[in-house]
């Protein structure tokens, strides 16, 4: 057995791309040589070795039974020419449509491994320069291609065709794919996109996009199942890890959920969100576990977003042992993504999204701006949401311009937790520190349970409940000096249930004048 075979595990033939004519000099076009080695490997199985060097290439496709071994010092550098990227049908922004071919693609394949300490570089700045540019200011040949995409896709939404830039790495309609060790950077669009696939492992990766990279998501798991993401570093220009399942009517018709996903031991340095679900939720997102992660400097920490018309169910999500720092808002569940909060209910149908059974456990969030924003829809309240052993310090200065229209409207009290249109939410051993405002505000919700809820700072009361049907207070401590712990009111009748508290908490529950609220022990 030769040395290359030993280093790659000895499985199948080993093909060195230099033996196929690749130069790795950073100037010559090595596409034909690299793709030739990959094609031969897909025909009989084995390993394609890319030695140290910079390999300039057009898009590449990895087939069945192939290991692509990018050695330390090897870089696949994709050409700065949109003409080299043929049209390709895939799912983009929640819809099946035609866009540019991904830089590195695994499609309709099984038993694929991409490994090594090399780098995949999408040369994204070539593509970013055209983002947001009016069509009449684009190069003529690029404008013509985008017009062809518009005609082929026949979309009536306001999403620009230039979101159809190529992802850096895509796994599509594939099974048993493993990616480990490599660095994936400078993606023209999303960095890593797993779509319509199953049994995919992403381990020990470095994913890097600049902060201003448009649509520069780190990892998007899209209508796929049995996906494992572990021990990965992400510095993204958009959402770091995002789970999706299609948009609106087409997403519901396709009906392929994103499910059975595990994220563990990951480090997110920057991005719009640490772990994000949606907004494409039409095919359902379910059975997700996120553990032992850190998020630093992200706009949001854990974010679930959907909207009327989207449909789908988000359920059975668990977030455990997570540390966040310098995050604008660590917890977001938003049924009004990119729209204003509308308190008037509408008819429930298949386009009404649902969120239920979401659990946050052992989470610390320090130096954040706003503690939480949780809002369902009045026609379908989001329920089964629990916070257990959660410590939030909302001590950073607040800037409403950072927030969506829905969040800005809900965050008049700025630093605290804001909840609206929830069916069942509980806060067990939760500590909230705010410099001012109300630590917890709940509106138009069914049942809210506080067990061992503590606050520091802010202005009394600790809890403001408006039109809450049942507020349960357990294991809470009455404030010193006679301040109110909870103030309740609203137009609808409701009740406050007290039990197992410390001190005369009944004296610290204030009912608004004229409100039909029963306080019982």
Image: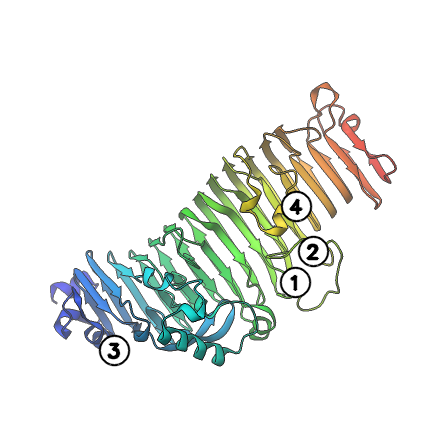
> Which residue is label 4 attached to?
410
Disc 1 + disc 2, Cβ < 8 Å: yes
- Dot 1 and dot 4 residues touching (CB under 8 Å): no
Task: Give the alpha-carbon distance from disc 1 to disc 2, as whole Å.
Answer: 8 Å
In the displayed structure, 482 sits above or below 26; it is above
Residue 460 position within the rendered picture, expressed as x and y whole percent measured from the top left: 70, 28
Give me the C-alpha separation between circle 4 and circle 2: 13 Å
Q: Which residue extends farthest front?
A: 136
Q: Which residue is mark 2?
A: 377
Judged from the image, the secondary structure of the residue bearing numbered disc 3 is helix
Numbered tag placed on residue 308 in the rendering: 1
In the depicted structure, whether residue 209 falls above or below residue 430? below
For marks 4 and 2, give the one nearer the viewer. Answer: 4
> In the rendered image, which quarter contains the C terminus?
top right
| Mark 1 or 3, nearer chain start | 3
Write down the quadrant of residue 457 in the picture: top right
Which is in the foreground here, disc 1 or disc 3? 1
Looking at marks 3 and 2 on the same chain, the residue that comes earlier in the sequence is marked by 3
SS at circle 1? loop
Tag 3 residue = 39
Few, some or many residues within 10 Å of mark 3 (<14, 14–19, 20+): some
Residue 340, position in %: x, y? 66, 54
User: Is residue 10 among what the camera can see?
Assistant: no
User: Compared with residue 351, is residue 116 higher up or lower down, i.e. above or below?
Assistant: above
Give how far across and how far down residue 78 sits, in percent.
27, 66
Label located before the other in sequence (4 or 2)? 2
Judged by depth in the image, the label closer to the viewer, 1 or 4, is: 4
């Amino acid at each position: 057995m030769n040395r290359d075979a030993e280093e790659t595990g000895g499985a199948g033939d080993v093909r060195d791309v230099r033996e196929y004519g690749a130069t790795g000099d950073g100037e010559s076009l090595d596409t034909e040589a690299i793709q030739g080695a990959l094609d031969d490997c897909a025909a009989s199985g084995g390993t394609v070795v890319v030695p140290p060097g910079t390999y300039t290439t057009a898009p590449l496709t990895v087939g069945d039974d192939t290991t692509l071994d990018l050695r330390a010092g090897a870089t696949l550098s994709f050409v700065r020419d949109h003409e080299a990227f043929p049209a390709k049908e895939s799912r983009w922004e929640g819809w099946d449509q035609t866009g540019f071919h991904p830089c590195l693609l695994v499609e309709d394949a099984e038993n694929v491994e991409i490994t090594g300490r090399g780098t995949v570089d999408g040369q994204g700045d070539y593509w970013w320069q055209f983002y947001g540019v009016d069509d009449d200011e684009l190069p003529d040949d690029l404008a013509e291609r985008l017009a062809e995409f518009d005609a082929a896709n026949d979309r009536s939404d306001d999403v620009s065709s230039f979101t159809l830039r190529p992802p850096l790495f895509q796994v599509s309609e594939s099974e048993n794919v493993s990616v480990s060790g490599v660095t994936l950077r400078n993606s023209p669009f999303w960095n890593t996109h797993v779509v319509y696939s199953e049994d995919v492992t992403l381990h020990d990766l470095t994913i890097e996009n600049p902060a201003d990279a448009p649509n520069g998501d780190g990892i998007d798991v899209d209508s796929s199942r049995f996906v494992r993401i572990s021990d990965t570093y992400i510095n993204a220009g958009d959402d770091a890890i995002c789970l999706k399942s299609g948009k609106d009517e087409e997403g519901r018709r396709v009906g392929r959920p994103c499910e059975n996903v595990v994220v563990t031991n990951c480090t997110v340095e920057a991005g719009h969100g640490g772990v994000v679900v949606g907004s494409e939720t039409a095919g359902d997102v379910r059975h997700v576990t996120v553990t032992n992660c850190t998020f630093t400097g992200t706009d949001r920490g854990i974010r679930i977003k959907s909207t009327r018309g989207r449909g789908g169910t988000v359920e059975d999500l668990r977030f455990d042992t997570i540390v966040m720092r310098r995050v604008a808002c660590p917890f977001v569940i938003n049924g009004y993504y990119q729209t204003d909060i509308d308190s008037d209910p509408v008819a429930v149908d298949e386009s009404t999204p649902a969120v239920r059974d979401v659990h946050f456990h052992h989470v610390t969030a320090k130096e954040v701006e706003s503690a939480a924003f949780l809002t369902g829809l009045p026609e379908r309240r989001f329920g089964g949401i629990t916070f257990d052993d959660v410590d939030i310090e909302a001590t950073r200065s607040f800037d409403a311009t950072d927030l969506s229209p829905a969040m800005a409207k809900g965050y008049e009290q700025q630093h605290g937790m804001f909840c609206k249109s929830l069916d069942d939410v509980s806060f067990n051993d939760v500590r909230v520190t705010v410099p001012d405002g109300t630590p917890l505000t709940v509106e138009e919700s069914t049942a809210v349970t506080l067990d061992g809820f503590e606050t520091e700072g802010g202005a009394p009361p600790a809890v403001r409940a408006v039109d809450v049907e049942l507020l349960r207070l357990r294991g809470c401590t009455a404030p010193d000096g006679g301040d109110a712990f909870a103030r309740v009111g609203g137009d609808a009748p409701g009740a406050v249930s007290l039990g197992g508290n410390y001190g005369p908490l009944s004296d610290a529950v204030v009912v608004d004048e004229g409100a039909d609220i029963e306080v019982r022990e």
